[in-house]
Image (cartoon, rainbow, N blue to C red):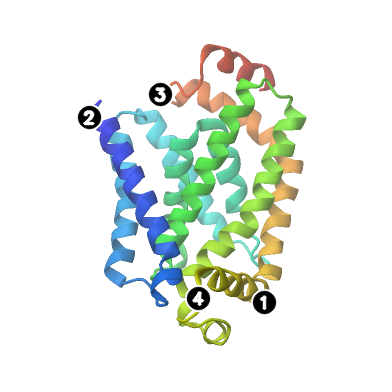
Amino acid sequence: MQGRLIANLALLLSTLLGLAMLLWPFFASAVPPLAATLLLGVLVLVVGLGAVQGQELDAKGVALLAVLAALNGALRLLPTFGGASPIFFLLLVGGYVFGAGFGFLFGALTIFVSAIVTGGFGPWLPYQMLAAAWLGASAGLLGRLLRRWQASMALNLAALGLLGLGWGLLYGALLNLWFWPASADATNLSSSGLERVGELLSFIIFYFATSFAYDLWRSALNLLLVLTLGGATLKILYRFQRRFYYTRLTTLKEDDYAKAVA
């Protein structure tokens, strides 16, 4: 019980601090302090430690999470185009099957592992970890909702594909927020005297002018992979869920449904 409370508090703190850091430019017209950015990354990792301490995962579940995160992090080495990357597909289906808590951990650890593999450490890393964690968690929430509705596999894939399509753009937009005030383009588009609505419009203009076309490739690949590989991958992961995942993320009715679609 205490471990679960620690995990929930860490999740809440990391989410609140992440939102504060992402919204910082609209109130301070400057990049967030480095110390706060590092604290965000630490808190995201504490969520993982709290979850393990709370025994949401047994040894097999931890091993499964580690293997998936390592595999997904290594996928970042594959040649890509634009903002497209196959790592988001596994985050979507993994979170969808194993739930929001697993999805949050999976997203954060995937980005952390990929940073080790690619040497991609920098002030942007905590934002990447948090955005990926939110992506995985949102997929988990969507999966739980559709299992309760007893949705068909076709509807599952359509909903998951749309989620991937939206996150392909949202992920890029969230990451833009950390450096927007320091960029030359942002300086031309906004000033400290603008009202909040004006600053938001300036950011939207900045995003479409700099990253929108780049992020479209990510959205397109997310949708394509979900529609082509999603069905088979979901069935495989549902089998792993029943064999290795410790916490009962579903009710009995939902578990019967998972068996049926798998």
Tell me the quarter of the image containing the C terminus. top right
Residue at numbered disc 4: 180
Provide residue 238's location: percent of width, then percent of height.
58, 26
Residue 239 seen from this side = yes
Q: Which mark is residue 2?
A: 2
* Residue 63 occupies quadrant: top left
Between 253 and 24, the one nearer to me in the picture = 24
Residue at numbered disc 3: 246
Q: Residues within 10 Å of mark 4 (few under 14, many from 20)?
A: many
Q: Residues within 10 Å of mark 2 (few under 14, many from 20)?
A: few
Between 202 and 54, the one nearer to me in the picture = 202
Amino acid type shown at disc 3: Tyr
In terms of sequence position, does the residue under pointer 3 or pointer 2 come before the other? 2
Instruction: Tell me what residue is drawn at x 39 percent, y 29 percent.
Output: 60
Q: Which mark is residue 209?
A: 1
Question: Marks 2 and 1: which is nearer the front?
Answer: 1
* Residue 239 occupies quadrant: top right
